[in-house]
Image: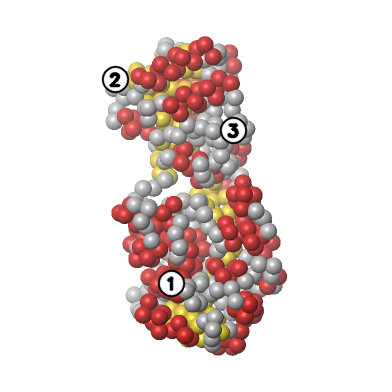
Amino acid sequence: MDAIQLVTGSQMAAIDRRAVNSGIPGIDLMESAGQGIARIAKELLNGFANRHIAVLCGKGNNGGDGFVLARWAAEQGAKVHVFLFATPEEIQGDAKTNFERIEHLPIVSVTEEKVIHTVQNALKQTDLVIDALLGTGINSPVHGIIAQAINLLKQAKCPILAVDVPSGLNADTGQGDCASATQTVTFACPRIGHFFYPGRTACRHVSLIDIGIPKVAVTAESSSFFLIDAKWASQALPQRTPDAHKGNCGRVFILAGSVGLTGAAALSATAAVRSGSGLVSLGIPKSLNDILECKVTEAMTRPLPEIRKARCLALNARGEIASLIAKADAVAIGPGLGTHRQTITLVHRLIEDLTCPTVIDADALNALVGHLDVIKNCTTPLVLTPHLGEFSRLTGQSIEDIRKDPITSAQKFAQKLGHIVILKGGPTIVAEPNGHIHINPTGNAGMATGGTGDILTGLIASFIGQGLSPSVAARLGVYIHGLAGDLVAEKKGQMGLTAGDVVQALPKALVAASQTQHPKPYLTQVAL
């Protein structure tokens, strides 16, 4: 199953060069890019006839794409005004060729502050503005006349179509001062910054256009970054044979719960059931058994030895739990376990007992703070699912530092431990020990509520139990989890979204994923 490759700005430039060196003229690639922009612009305007379009162009290839768009739009009846933020003499190569092809159009060279008012006036009267100023090569703050243009775009009342990324946005990180686009169009490969906030908000919706760059030119770049996309997810879903029975659809054992935290255990078990597991067993402190038997109907409860007053799992439960683990195809440990010292020691011992792939979450992660050797020494595949706070405690990094570069933080930690690390957030990152990073595009801010992480734990364990590798299960789990949240938000909005809503929506999410559907896809692939 091929995944969509994510690239940095410099990697995309290398891909372009490789395509040209393979024999594809750069002028042809620019022509295809401009046609693609024109197609999206035409859709936004419901046709070009008598529509006013302002095209803001820089001197580079991003501006060259804008020149092609200007020509195509004008030929189809649009009233186009081009604003060049350079002198004509500064334009080189293919961009210069395309500039010369539009010299019959109204063009204003904006190189001095006294001319910026012409742009301001045009933006008040235009139906659409094309932001083709800078593209993906920016990695530092913008100054001068371009910065003034970006400020005008921020004030614009008309729709904005950004080329590659909104000007001023760092394509590698999603950071930067830019105007929010109505839509963004990019080519060949999405950039990493398209998926990290605030860049994702600024891009609004990304149309990915195939302009004819050979696949080999992309794969030769050896990127370590990939998107978990709808097509991949539909192909990764577990399949049942017509003669399937509960015994061969995955036996999952979940160890969870303590007094006051039975909801976490119930949500995790219900998620495993609702995502296709044949048999789910939920190990809990014995005094909580009656409560969990009421909360979960389809999962079997396994009352286990507890610390009576604390009502959490005791160390002497190890033997019984180990026998339950031995019968499972997948295990999850952590949701709502509590942090009693005996429970912490129990977690350490149980990791030594593991015989099948296991998801480690919540209080099981907290139990490993300062004890990472327990994980490093574990030869059974593990999937760790920390949120920012848990990740900070595990690594010793501040949350602020993690947020500055979450990809590198997750990547290094997964390589250090030798296990898969899922850093939950906006977006969620799946980091593998081989250095590969997978970015999840689904999910929304309404899922920032208690219990949603417990659902993810049950989902991933369920997919492992149904025969998927831990790597595929981790990626598919975060995708389906986010998709379920998006389906709920589409109907109920984000503010009132609950974990219970998400777990109930899992079957619909599985159906939607099998049909590569999403209520509001952020990225759309477009073929010319």
**385 over 166 or under it: above or below:** below
| Front one among 527 and 440 | 440
**Is residue 397 shown left or right of residue 302?**
right
The kind of secondary structure element at disc 1 is helix
Q: Earlier in the sequence, mark 2 or mark 1?
A: 2
Whether residue 209 is visible: no
For the point 33% across and 33% down, the residue is 43
Amino acid under label 1?
Answer: Gly
State the image coordinates of residue 338 (x, y, percent, origin top left).
Answer: 55, 74
User: Label 3 sits on what residue type?
Assistant: Gly
Say above or below: 80 vs 33: above
Q: Which residue type does callout 2 highlight?
A: Asn
Q: Gap between marks 3 and 2, in whole Å?
A: 34 Å
Placement of 405 over or under 163, stated as above or below: below
Q: Mark 1 packing: few (<14 Cα in 10 Å), some, or many (20+)?
A: many
Q: Circle 1 sits on which residue?
A: 263
Q: Residue 251 location in percent, x, y? A: 46, 79
Outermost residue to the front: 309
- Which label lies toward us, 3 or 1? 1
Q: Which mark is residue 50?
A: 2
Q: Which mark is residue 137?
A: 3
Task: Say which residue appears at 40% left-offset and 21% top-offset.
Answer: 123
**On the rendered structure, is 162 left or right of 20?**
left
Question: Where does the C terminus fall, quadrant-wise?
Answer: top left
| Residue 180 seen by the camera | yes
